Structures are given as C-alpha cells and as structure tokens.
Amino acid sequence: MTPRVRAPELPQNYTWLNTAQPLSLKELRGRVVILDFWTYCCINCLHILPDLKYLEQKYPDSLTVIGVHSAKFDNEKEIENIRQAILRYDIEHPVLVDRDFRVWEEYAVRAWPTFMIIDPAGYVVGYLSGEGKRDTLDELIQQLINQHQAKGTINFQEISLTLEKQRQPLTTPLAFPGKVLATPAGLFIADSGHHRVVMSSYEGEILQIIGTGKSGLTDGGFNEAQFFAPQGMAFDQENQILYVADTENHSLRQVDLKSQRVKIIAGTGEQSYNMRPHGGAGLETSLNSPWDLVQWGQTLFIVMAGSHQIWQMNLESGIVTTYAGTGAEACMDGVLTESAFAQPSGITTDGEELYIADSEVSSIRGVRLKEPQQVRTICGSGDLFGFGDVDGASENVRLQHCLGVEYAQNYLWVADTYNHKIKLVSPSTGNCQTILGDGSAGLKDGQGQNTRFCEPSGLSMMENYLYISDTNNHAIRRVDLNTFEVTTLEFPDLCAPDMCIPPMG
C-alpha cells in the first residue's frame, strides 16, 4: 500500500491575492482543495480556467481552488501584473504568488498547468497535468466528498473571499484591449476585457460598438452579438467586412459593416484538442484559441495560439486547414510540415512572407508564402526559456513574450510585450532595435524611449502613424513616425458596458 503523503503547508508570509488573508491547509481541513499551478502567459493555463470556474460553482461548499502562480517570465513575477491577469481573466479563487518556485518544488511539479488534489484530511491524493481534465476532476471531487461524508470528515461551508475585482472594479472605457487595426474606414479596437469590438474615427469619435459587452457566442445585429475575449482582426476594405479572432470562443467571426450583422464563419464554439495538422469545413471544424489574423487575397491566415500552429481559411470555399506547424510547442525551422511554433500570437505579411510574433519562444518567425515554403527564425533565441531584453542581430536578440507584429516599409514593428517596449526589426538582417519605451511598466507620453507602456500587445500602421494597443493601460496609443512622438488617444463618448448613463429625455 502506498504511504499517504501529507500536503506541505502553504507559505503564510508570501503575497496572496483574491483573499483578505493567507489561507492555510490546516484551516481548510474538511474541504477538498485543488492547487492549480499556473503562469499567466501560458495558453494552456488560461484554457483550464473555465473548467475550474465550473467546478467551483458546482461545489461551492466543499471545494477550494487555490491558484499557485509560479512565474515563467521575469515580468510575470511582478505582483501588480499578476493582479491585472486575475482581473483580465476574471479569476475568482485565491491566488498565492509562488516566489522562487518554493511551492512548485515542495509539490514536485514539472509542468504548467498542474493540479494537486488534496483530500479533506489534508493528504495529497493525486495530481493531473495539462488541459481537458474537467470530467476527471469532477469525478474525483465527487468521490472524495462521498468518502469523507460517510466518515464524517467533511466540513460543508462556503468560504467568503475578498476579490481583486471588488477592490479594483474595472470601469475604464476600454478593458485590456488586445489588438488594434487601423483601416481607411476607421480604427477597430478589440476591447477584449469588455468582449466587444469598438470602431472609432482617428479623432476618437465612436462610430460603432459591436457586441453587447457580455461574454457569449451569439450572432446577429451589432447590439445583440456576443464575443468572448476577441483579439486579432483583418479588414476587407472592398466588401466592408471585418474578420475577428474570437479567441475564447475558439471561433472566427465575420462582421459585415454594410448590413451591421455578425456571424460565425469557422469554429464550433468548443476548443479543439486535436494538435495534429488537419482541416475541414469552417463551421464543422473546432479551433484552438485563434489569436490574430491577416488577409492575403482570398486567404485568411490565422495564428492558432492554442495548438502552436499557423492555419489558413479559404474565404471562397469556407475550408480551414493547418498551414504550418506540427502542433508541438517548440521553435523548429524548415519545411511547413516539420516546423514548430510556441503560442504564436501576432501575424502580418508583406505578400511574400508571413511574419509571426512567436510569444513563448520570444522570437520573430518568417513563413514564406511562395516556393520554397520554408519557416525561419528572424530574431530571438528560439528557446522556450531564452528571453530577456537585448537589442542586436538575429539569434543574439532577446525579447520577452512578444505578442504583436506589424509590417511597414521593409521593417517589422514588434510589441515586445513583457519588456513594455516597441522594437523595430529588419526581416532581411534580423537586426532589432528598441524605438519606444524605457522598459518600465507605466503610462507616459513623450518621445522615443522617454515613454512608457504596460504590456502592449497589438500594433497597426496607417499612413504615418503607428497605433498601439497598450493592454494593461486600457489604452490606445498613437505614434507619429516622423518624430516618434507618442500620445494617448481619447474616446470621450465611450464607456464601459453598464456604465453609460442614458441621455435625459
């Protein structure tokens, strides 16, 4: 018989979020506890949050989930950044900031995400790693409740928590805007935290609000459609159609500006767990966190962050297929079928090559559209843990979880997200230089490197201006490329959903 292992106690002197005071396993005796080891950059960790929410709501009086945030990137060690991630992803359970991987090591964790299951007597009864574990966890929780109810060792009661969103309600007009798209028709903003798309003029006048502001997957008119954390967009100027990567709905949506209607064109609304290259009819094929889009002729190219691949959709036939990437999370160059990416999150093109912000390997990749169709690494180490903040050339460059990339005039603008900088990369030489941002998180207008951003993640160019989705500042910034002057756009008529006061009549 395997000896039972008492769960190591959680540190009380570390930072705890989403709770008024630290929690101890001793005081949680009588409840089932799940420790969720996560880091907020990790797409797999984000995918399991709805599963945890489902379980928390199903067993409110007998289950406590504690997120143990063991950071991969340096930027993810900052308390304020973790707090912002809790707000962004609407996490409603306590989160322990696992400084220096102490708890990770005590529980011998090896990968993100990992769940440690602790029974009401305080013993570790098992662990699971990876996604798609909701049913297994559900079954295990139910078994533990039944066993301990029979023994009289369960303590049914709801625990009251003080959530970050109660302390810091999100009332800004934009909430964690993920991507921005500058077009001749106007500026489109993926207002990801408000689950909607905002269309404005370049002077900040609101032209359209697309979506109710509540998360969901609903087609229809602009005032009834629903999205779930939308990200990248592409615009068909001729037909006045906006394509949207509806990331947490694992879907692609079409927004028709003429008829003012939204419809799903790919995805089933369910996450795909098939990592092998495949394809099929758009509406019958499950997708996995599409994060950004670029249109090239009648093809929509998609960075599929969840499956670490580049996909394509034929807009005439409606067929979606894997274009590049085996599905392994890695950095492999070469032919399309043998290449590998790591949570690709930004895409742009010059018509010859696709350029990819490959976030988990902190690298910029190139994918040739014409023969020979090859994948290459333009700059960055290509290593899952090879990150930093170093300008220079090709493999000597260090970025930190870059999420955005925009091609213009033979150069690539890069949102070096976790370094809070905007950099310029030559696709021909791999040379990379910091242009904007001093590397500290903040909101500061000004010129060049005498400016500050906070996790910028989307970029778009129109004429002589670069528009930046400054995600954690809930702002859109504009850069005059003649002077490198940065200003913050104002949207005086925009407000958060449910915050607008109707005009007096």
Image: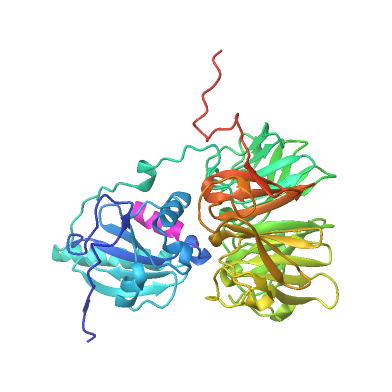
Q: Quadrant of the C terminus?
A: top right
In the rendered view, would you say 304 is above or below 337? above
Q: Residue at x 76, y 36 (%)?
A: 259
Image spot of residue 247 (x, y percent): 59, 55
Left or right side of 122 for 167:
right
In the image: residue 391, left or right of residue 131 = right
| Closer-to-camera residue (245/205) | 205
Magenta-span inclusion, residue 69:
no
- Residue 130 vs 220, above or below: the answer is below
Q: Position of residue 105 (x, y in %)?
A: 33, 77
Residue 14 in the image: state x and y as whole percent.
28, 62
Q: Residue furthest bottom?
A: 1
Magenta part, dominant SS: helix
> In this rendering, does residue 71 appear at all?
yes
Q: In the image, which residues are magenta?
A: 47-57
Q: Is residue 455 above or below residue 133?
A: above
Residue 128 is left or right of residue 406, and the answer is left
Residue at the image point whose x is 51% and y is 38% from the top: 172
Q: Residue 273 sits in which quadrant?
A: bottom right
- Check residue 52 for magenta coloring: yes
Image spot of residue 428 (x, y percent)? 79, 71
Is residue 234 visible from the viewing direction of this image? no
Quadrant where the image shows the N terminus:
bottom left
